[in-house]
Every structure is written in structure tokens, then in C-alpha cells.
Amino acid sequence: MRRILFCRPTFLPRLLCGALLLAGGHALAATAWVSNEKDNSLSLIDMQTLEVTETLAVGQRPRGLLLSHDNKLLYICASDSDRVQVMDVATRNIVKELPSGKDPEQFALHPNNRWLYVSNEDDALVTVIDTETAKVLGQINVGVEPEGMAVSPDGKWAVNTSETTNMLHWIDTRTQTLAESTPVDQRPRFVEFSRDGSRLWASAEIGGTLTILDTASRQVLKTLGFQIKGVHPDKVQPVGIKLSADGRYAFVALGPANHVAVVDAKTYEILDYLLVGRRVWQLAFTPDQSRLLATNGVSGDVSVIDVNSLKVLKSVKVGRYPWGVVVTP
């Protein structure tokens, strides 16, 4: 439903009224970009109409997606092409291909908007690329089957998960070297820093758990398990994580359990489970964080969640095996 903001000059200064109207229109104009792993394509969803407006051909087996910090460039892990593709958001054209190393799946961008940290699953490496020069700055040996990547808000740490070694690898970005490794539960898949960088959240797919760590000490603070009525524990496989900017919620995609868990980000209490599509994989907020999108690989759709009410509003059909998702203003 389209929101209409009425502003009364008696109560709101004219400039504030204009700002509110602009903000409302800005949120409605958002576009979601979804990678379709089996179709070698991206689906674009208009967040006002909740309809697919465009389908773009990209490299083979696109999975991870991320945006440059100014939202001008979209980075695409074309896993079977062994490349990271760079798309101009405005023109929808691929403008560059980066030497990512073999089988890139997930990646993270440094706060300097330049250094890209890429997991190379087949080679047990993290490749660091200068996105401006397209040069490899270094390759760091990590555990077997590296997957998740995150960079701390202050840029000090890049953290990688290794699925088979069951560890988080802390890379010192000043030296581009491995500084420390932290054991976690089985098959860690995704990591996400809190907005202030003080906490790191890590999902473990086979372990069925979520681990919260203190960034300064790299020590585990809490490990959560999930129990959903009517769902066999083996199907509870945590993968993607998103933390709300206000520090209130952590949302966790639970894979073939077909639910997104809602966690209180301060008390670590599990608040709810939201039923979505089949094999929910990754998550993304709209720019105003009023909506959360969840990609459902097996059912080939994207669930739209209202963050305020914690209700699923709609499922939007996209391509085959949707994997990654980001949203531009």
C-alpha cells in the first residue's frame, strides 16, 4: 500500500515537510536485485509494486551480491565464470570484471570502498582485490571451503568462515595476513558485524546454531539453537543474517526449515519464526529498513517481510534458485 504523508504547515516547517515527502518517495522507489543461480541472471523487483520489472543476463552461476558504498556499482560473484563482475547500477551494463580467483561465492567490501575480500571455496583462499585497478593485492590461506566474508565497520578486520574446518578466520587488513582463528559450530556459512563493530554474528548450517562473538577479544559470548514446532531439527540450517541498524533485531535465514528467525539483538532471545518460501538463503533490508527480503532457492521466489509488524506481506516470483539480494534506493 502506498503511504501518503500529509503535512500541516502549522505544525511542521516547510523544509521538514518536504524532507518527509522526499523520504517517503525515496523508500517507494527502491529496487531489489536478486541473483538467480540456475538462470545466470538477475531479477529486478520494484519495491512499490512488488513486481519483477527487468531480468538481466550475467555470468555463470551468480550468487553473492553487494553494492559499493555509494550504491553506484553492483558487484556480482559469477561463481562458475571465476570472476567478480561489476555492473553500473544506472546503465545496467557490466563495466568491469575482476580477477576473483576460483569459484567466488561471497565477498565483502572494505570501508575504503576499494578493497574487496573474496572467498575462493575451491582453493582455501581469500583473495583481496583493488577494485579501482583490478589488481590482486594478496591471497590469504584460510580453512577448507571458505564461504562467508565480512569486514568490520572500522576496516580493521576481515573475517572469513571455512565450512569444513569449522572456523572463523580473522584477517588483519593492515597487513593482509591471517591473525587468528576461532572454532565455531559445524559448517559456518555467513558472518555479519553489528553496526558499531563490537559484535560478530556467525551462522553454522550443519550445527544448526548462531554464534555471537565479542570483536575485541574474539571470544564467544553466546551460541543459540533453534527449535521450530513441526520442523525436524536436521532441517534447521542457519545461513544468511541481517542486523537492523537500530540494534533491535537479528534476522536469520534457516535454510530448508523455510523460516526466518527473529532474535532480540540485545538479549539474544528468540522472538519469533516467520514462515517464508522453500530453502530460504539470504536476506536484505530496503534502505529505510521497513522491509526485509528473503531469497527462497527451491520455491524460486522472494518473501517480503514487514519489519514493524514482523509479518510476511507477499512472495514475488523470480528466476530459478534465487541466492543473493541487495536493494538500491
Image: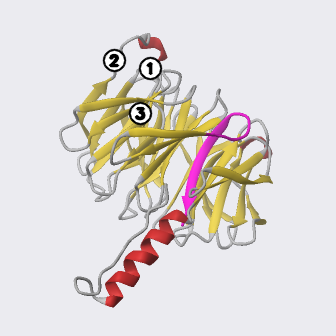
Mark closer to the chain start, 2 or 1: 2
**3D distance between C-alphas at marks 2 and 3:** 15 Å
Give, as a three-letter code, the residue at label 2.
Answer: Gln
In three-dimensional space, the C-alpha distance between marks 3 and 1, rounded to whole angstroms, equals: 11 Å
On whether residue 317 falls in the magenta region, the answer is: yes
Q: Residue at x 32, y 83 (%)?
A: 16
Q: Nearer the viewer, mark 3 or mark 1?
A: 1
Residue 279: x, y in percent? 57, 26
- Which quadrant of the figure has residue 98? bottom right
Q: Nearer the viewer, residue 285 or 128?
A: 285
Q: Earlier in the sequence, mark 3 or mark 1?
A: 3
Name the amino acid type tagged 3.
Ser
Q: Residues within 10 Å of mark 3 (few under 14, many from 20)?
A: many
Q: Nearer the viewer, residue 243 or 217?
A: 243
Q: Which residue is mark 3?
A: 203
**Label 1: which secondary element:** loop
Residue at 35% x, 82% y is 17
In the picture, the disc for residue 236 is: 1
Check contact, mark 2 vs mark 1: CB within 8 A.
yes
> Principal SS element in the magenta part?
strand
Quarter of the image with the C terminus in it: bottom right
Question: Which span of residues is magenta-colored?
Answer: 316-329
